[in-house]
Image: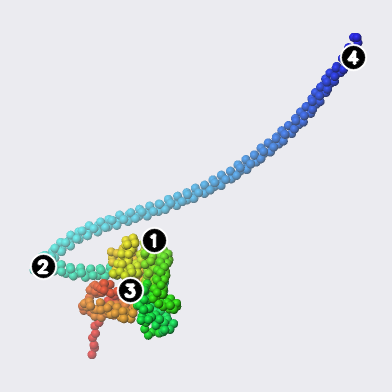
Amino acid sequence: MTALIPLALAPELVGAIVVLVAAAGGVAVAAILLSKRTRVARSATEQILAQARREAEALIKEAKVEAKEEAIQAREAFGKEAAKTRDELRERERSVVKREDTLDSKMGTLAAKEKTVETVERRVSDMEKNWNKRKVELDHMVEDEKRQLFKISGLGADEARTILLERMEAEVQHESAALVQRAIERAQETADQRSREILAATIQRLASDYTSEATVATVDIPNDEMKGRIIGREGRNIRAFERATGVDVIVDDTPGIVVLSSFDPVRREVGRRSLAKLIADGRIQPPRIEQIVADCRKDIEREMNETGKQVALDTGVKGLHAKEIQLLGRLKFRTSYGQSVLKHSIEVSALSGMLADQLGLDGRLARRAGLLHDIGKAVDHEVQGGHPEIGADLARRYNETAEVVHAIGKHHEPDVQSMLYTMIVAAADAVSASRPGARRETLEKYIQRLEKLEGIACRFDGVDRAFAIQAGREVRVIVDADKVDDELAMTVCRDIAKAVEDELTYPGEVKVTLIRERRVIEYAR
């Protein structure tokens, strides 16, 4: 019974033994694997450390090389900067030395000049003392001479004083005339030269052509039968046309044309265009006439506005009132002595701006005043008065500046007290008007102007003859040498010029040349 118990327990022990053996084997295997992994990890770690050491050594070497290169570059840069600084210091040192030498030289010169000035001052002081001494002596001598003269002549002090004052007055008058002549000559020398330079430089920058127009306009007609159609039955067409346009229609025996006459240039242009359209259309009757005239008037007004805007743009004048632009457009159809007033105003504007720029003034203000100086001519057929006054009133109404208003109102009669811009506009107006070919006038008016110019000169005392030359731009006056001396000749010449300015209307300027000579004739027999 006892022998059978171990045999019965043997399977359980066997299982336990197997489990223990298996566990022991697993532990051994795990230990082997752990040992192997530890060796592999240690080997990898050593390799990583070795690689890290090599990289660190390489980085250290590169850092050392870069540090050396940077140190070398810094040393070179510092050397260049130091060399540049040394050069600048040497240059400044040379400049300072040169300035010191210059100052020493100037100090020496100043010292010499001071000595010279002191010497001159001493001389002047000595001369002043001598002059005072001589003056006192001369005063005593004059008093002695007066007493002796009184004794010799027997005149009293009052009588002698009267005679002396008369002599002194004559001498002073003679000397004053001579001084006036010399002053005028000096002023003319400088003023003429400067004015020629300014005007020459200004005129050569501007050249314009003008189209001469008159107070009449002609319209071509295809045949004489058209004249009858223009007149109409019992003259109803021509009356309707004159009533609608405000112009006079002259239908005469002149072949091929019909003449329109009116002092209002805008009305004349409306009439000319209307009649040309009616002739081209062929339907000439009162209702058609009124329609064509109304259309042409609208076209003219639109054209005037566009012209005024274009002129303001071309001349560079900004901020014009709408009414001023329209009035400038009306000047396109206005003429003066055959010269287009609009083109004349454009030229005066340009000349005024150039003159103002030459003189250092405001060119824009001068151009504005020059452009508007004849604006009164746009309505001078509708308003009483001269165009300068009308233009000044219009400019004042449209809030123009005082300089512009004064230039418009006084551009035909500037005086010494006029504003500078008024003088500039007057000069530009004279240059534009007197330029050869700018204006024309009839032969009758031309002859009347020359005769009046000669008559003004001949009415002065002492004038023998007078001749108008250079197309009325110069008058030669010959005086009697027995009646007019050299001093009086200057006064007579100025009076003649002033009378011409006051009484005669002319473009530009008139030169008055007075000639005084004495001819002595004797015959040897």
The residue beneath circle 4 is 7
Residue 228 position, x and y percent, is 39, 83
Left or right: residue 28 compared with residue 7: left
**CA distance for labels 1 and 2:** 73 Å
Gap between marks 2 and 3, in whole Å? 56 Å
Which label lies toward us, 1 or 4?
4
Category of crowding for the residue at label 4, using alpha-carbon neighbours closer than 10 angstroms: few (below 14), some (14–19), many (at least 20): few
- CA neighbours of label 2 inside 10 A, class few (<14), some (14 to 19), many (20+): few
Disc 3 from disc 4: Cα separation: 165 Å
Whether 276 is drawn above or below 67: the answer is below
Looking at the rendered structure, the secondary structure element under dot 1 is loop
Q: Which mark is residue 507?
A: 3
User: Callout 1, which amino acid?
Assistant: Gly
Distance of mark 1 from mark 4, alpha carbons?
138 Å
Residue at 58% of width from left, 43% of height from top?
A: 74
Q: Is residue 248 above or below residue 378?
A: below
Q: Quadrant of residue 368?
A: bottom left
Image point (63%, 41%), residue name: 66
Tell me the element at label 2: helix
Report which quarter residue 148 is drawn in: bottom left
Label 2 close to label 3 by CB (< 8 Å): no
Q: Nearer the viewer, mark 2 or mark 3?
A: 3
Dot in front, 1 or 2:
1
**Structural distance between the alpha carbons of marks 1 and 3:** 31 Å
Label 3 or label 4, whichever lies nearer to me, is 4
Which residue matches tag 2?
Answer: 159
Q: Which disc number belongs to residue 319?
A: 1
**Can residue 468 be seen in the rendering of this structure?**
no
Q: Earlier in the sequence, mark 1 or mark 3?
A: 1
Q: In what element is the residue under mark 4?
A: helix
The reply to whether callout 3 and callout 4 are in contact (CB within 8 Å) is no
Residue drawn at point x = 44 percent, y = 82 percent: 222
